[in-house]
Image: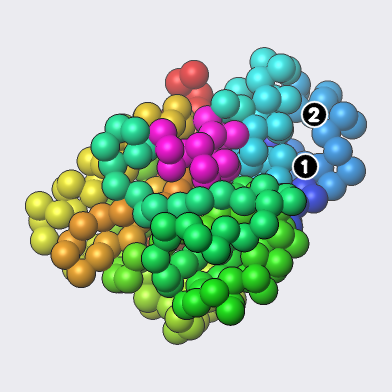
Amino acid sequence: MKLAVLYGGTSAEREVSLSSGKAIIDACKNLRHEVVELDPVNGMSNMISDLLSVDLVFNGLHGGDGENGVIPGFLQSLCVKFTGSGNEASAICMDKRVSKALVHRKGISTPDWVSLGKSDKIPMDNSLVYPLVVKPNDQGSTLGLSIVENDSQLEDAVAMARQFGNIILLEEFIAGKELTVTVIGDDSYPIVEIVPKHDLYDYDCKYTKGMTEYICPADLPDSLTKSIQESSVKIHHLLGCRHYSRVDFRLDENNKAWFLEVNTLPGMTENSLVPKSVAASGLSFSELIQIIIKEAMKD
């Protein structure tokens, strides 16, 4: 099969995407696929002939237009097959306000939040309880994210988050465990518990080897594991995702899971969570890539 791998791009997550793309390319070559490597750092218009020449486009872009629906929409307009969610689901999941609201409406718990627009002042009389997570509404890789304990820390945290996006979320912090679930098709994979060396699972902890301990499968009661995995598949379909995604939760001291967000194009680096999850079920990275390819070719 002839594949194009989109990776790199122009978002703040370019370096992560380059790493993911290289891993995907190596796996595709190991699987005997013919690979066209495409880095849209100068836009997509000069790549149309390459995109139309392949059987499938593997979207390895993270953040920005690769994940917010713009490039998926462009690929849809060309009527080419590609991995990952379409433009609508990508846009919904990138917009944390919208995805949280849709999930909350279906009775799935998510931490309380308020959003701030570009020129909105910080509401000092809001009903949220400290500590708070302050983060851009439409970024990944924890870029611009911080945890604040009081009003005096809030202004600086909002200013930092606004360097990465015009809309900011103030979200109640749920103390407890950080969990993530890989969903491929209708199947969920072993839950990963994330234990960072920093107080926060920040960019360094995500992408620096040895900065985070990953427990997979997470040490949870069987009934709780099943419930969280079922919720993950439900959320994946509720938000219109396809092929694969990663669903993130916090688990509080009472073993209640709180939905945080869905990543429609999760990382594929050696430290990434999806490869760790599927490895715990006995699959190699190349097998993971082939499963995603098969899912995409069904459409």
On residue 282, the disc is none
Image check: 226 left or right of 78?
left
- Crowding around mark 1 (Cα neighbors within 10 Å: few <14, some 14 to 19, many 20+) is many
Q: Which residues are magenta?
A: 89-102
Going by the numbered disc 2, the residue's amino acid type is Asp
Which residue is at a point 72% across and 40% down the rendered structure image? 65
Residue 265, percent from left and from top: 55, 45
Q: Which residue is denoted by mark 1 in the rendering?
A: 38
On residue 50, the disc is 2
Which residue is at a point 73% across and 50% down the rendered structure image? 118
**176 or 281: nearer the viewer:** 176
Residue 194, percent from left and from top: 37, 69
Task: Tell me, yes or no, if residue 264 can be seen here.
Answer: no
| Residue projecting furthest to the front | 125
- Crowding around mark 2 (Cα neighbors within 10 Å: few <14, some 14 to 19, many 20+) is some
Decide: is 123 above or below 159: above
Residue 178, percent from left and from top: 35, 65
Q: Quadrant of residue 104?
A: top left
Q: In the structure shown, which secondary structural element does the residue marked by tag 1 occupy?
A: strand
- The quadrant in which the N terminus is found is top right
Q: In the structure shown, which secondary structural element does the residue marked by tag 2 occupy?
A: helix
**188 or 108: nearer the viewer:** 108
249 magenta-colored? no
Going by the numbered disc 1, the residue's amino acid type is Leu
- Callout 2 touching callout 1 (CB < 8 Å): yes
Residue 154, percent from left and from top: 59, 71
Task: Tell me, yes or no, if residue 247 can be seen here.
Answer: yes
